[in-house]
């Protein structure tokens, strides 16, 4: 172990990587949600051929509501765009959190073939929420008082 590492000082290259990780995670997560959100409207990606019946029933139910599938995909497009444009990041992550949980549950319980991408999305969401944790501190306060003007 070098003296700098023993003192808790990162080597120069490691600092650069550490500074770039949130950007890389943000761009990757934004791209995934923008891509799959737009695909929900325009169906430009090939559909898997052997989707289990429970997964088809769930997706069909979302489509039959007439509003839920467009709401989910619209949220993905908006949040993915916010992530890619580096604007309102905490809001984008908060909007995506319920989708991320549902994506993971869908693939764990109904369509295990896509669980790898679901786990990657979960990891990126949690990592970015941690990286921007200071933005969530007020929201996670046990008690708060209204603002008075």
Image: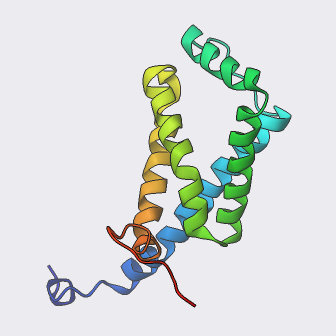
Q: Is residue 48 left or right of residue 135?
A: right
Question: Can you say whether 58 is above or below 107 in the image?
Answer: above
Q: Is residue 115 above or below residue 148?
A: above
Residue 68: where, in percent of width, then height?
71, 34
Residue in the image at 45% along x and 63% along y: 129
Q: Position of residue 59 (x, y in %)?
A: 65, 22
Name the residue at the right extreme.
42
Q: Is residue 4 above or below residue 40?
A: below
Query: What residue do we see at 69% from left, 64% from top?
Result: 82
In the image, taking residue 34 as reference, residue 121 lies left or right, namely left
Q: Position of residue 80 (x, y in %)?
A: 68, 56
Q: Residue at x 52, y 21 (%)?
A: 111
Extreme residue toward the top, this view: 53
Where 73 sits versus 127, above or below? above
Check the picture and name the quadrant holding the N terminus: bottom left
- Residue 66 % position (x, y): 79, 28
User: For this view, does 80 lie left or right of residue 94?
Assistant: right
């Amino acid at each position: 172990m070098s003296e700098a590492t023993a003192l808790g000082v990162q080597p120069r290259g490691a600092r650069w990587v550490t500074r770039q990780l949130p950007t890389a995670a943000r761009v990757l997560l934004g791209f995934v949600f923008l891509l799959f959100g737009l695909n929900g409207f325009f169906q430009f990606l090939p559909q898997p051929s052997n989707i289990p019946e429970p997964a088809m029933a769930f997706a069909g139910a979302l489509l039959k509501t007439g509003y839920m599938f467009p709401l989910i995909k619209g949220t993905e497009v908006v949040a993915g765009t916010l992530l890619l444009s580096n604007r309102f990041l905490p809001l984008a992550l908060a909007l995506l959190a319920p989708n991320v949980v549902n994506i993971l549950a869908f693939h764990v319980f109904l369509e295990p073939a896509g669980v790898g991408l679901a786990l990657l999305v979960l990891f990126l969401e949690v990592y970015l929420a941690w990286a921007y944790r200071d933005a969530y501190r007020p929201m996670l306060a046990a008690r708060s008082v209204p603002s008075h003007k």
